[in-house]
Amino acid sequence: MGEKILIIEDEENLVKGLKLNLDDEGYEVSWAIDGEEGLRKSLQESPDLIILDIMLPKMNGLDICRELRNRNILIPIVMLTAKGEEIDKVVGLEIGADDYLTKPFSVRELLARIKAHLRRQKREPSAVPSTHTLGDTEIDFVHFKVRRKKKESVLTSLECEILKYFFQHSGEVVTRDMLLEKIWGYDIFPTTRTIDNHILKLRKKIEDNPSRPKHILSVYGEGYRFMA
Ligand code: CA
């Protein structure tokens, strides 16, 4: 059987269409029509990836995402937002979603992103050691955690990949294009805004003062420079 994908979405026609396409690609698909069922299936079925709608009966997608990340469940989550829910996108990324698509979206694009997320998750462990220290911050790449000043936060798989890449290119300028190509690897690129949102989140987790970063520095017009 292929990788398992859980769709949490209450629009039945959309689910039927998605399921057909995902079946064709060889994925094993299950589906939940409300938020509570979605959370339960996320926990019981341990899918490899979740497609998560935001507006859902009983429990919304943002709360589901938050709950899963709080429980240290770090599988890729692709959120679906409707037009006019722009704020939810940002919130979604902040609470640990890996990606989002605005409805109506092309199924091809969704499939490309699913593939990219699953491929990234399966990639061989890199040469970066499993833990790293940055000042008084400890980054644990095995358990996807950051510990600083007795506070522990969880890294998403995407954040881990970005940080590993930064460590491998410490001191160098890392452009947004490099991040797009190496980390996202999409056929269809996310916007640079998406990258910047993830960097903001990472800074909050690893920097003493996220607005005056010492480790993930901005390089005007280029991207970032990571200082270990
Ligand atoms: Ca909905």
Image (cartoon, grey):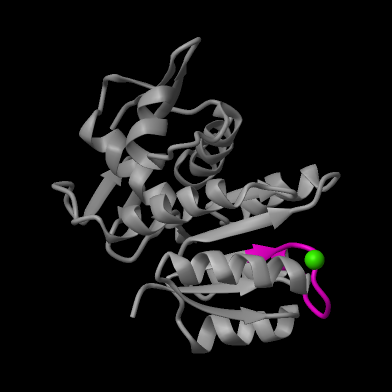
* Residues drawn in magenta: 52-61
Q: Quadrant of the C terminus?
A: top left
Which residue: 37% across, 61% down?
A: 144
Count of picture labels: 0
58 magenta-colored: yes
Which sits in the foreground, 217 or 85? Answer: 85
User: Where's residue 212, x and y in %?
Assistant: 54, 25
Residue at the outermost top position: 221
User: Which quadrant holds residue 90?
Assistant: top right
Picture quarter with ligand 1: bottom right
Q: Is residue 156 left or right of residue 162?
A: right
35 magenta-colored: no
Which sits in the foreground, 151 or 83? Answer: 83
Query: Quick check: 4 above or below 196?
Result: below
Which residue: 76% across, 74% down?
A: 12
Query: Quick check: 37 above or below 217?
Result: below
Q: Is residue 118 left or right of residue 108?
A: left
User: Where's residue 81, x and y in %?
Assistant: 74, 53
Which residue: 55% across, 31% down?
A: 196
Residue 70 shows in the view: no
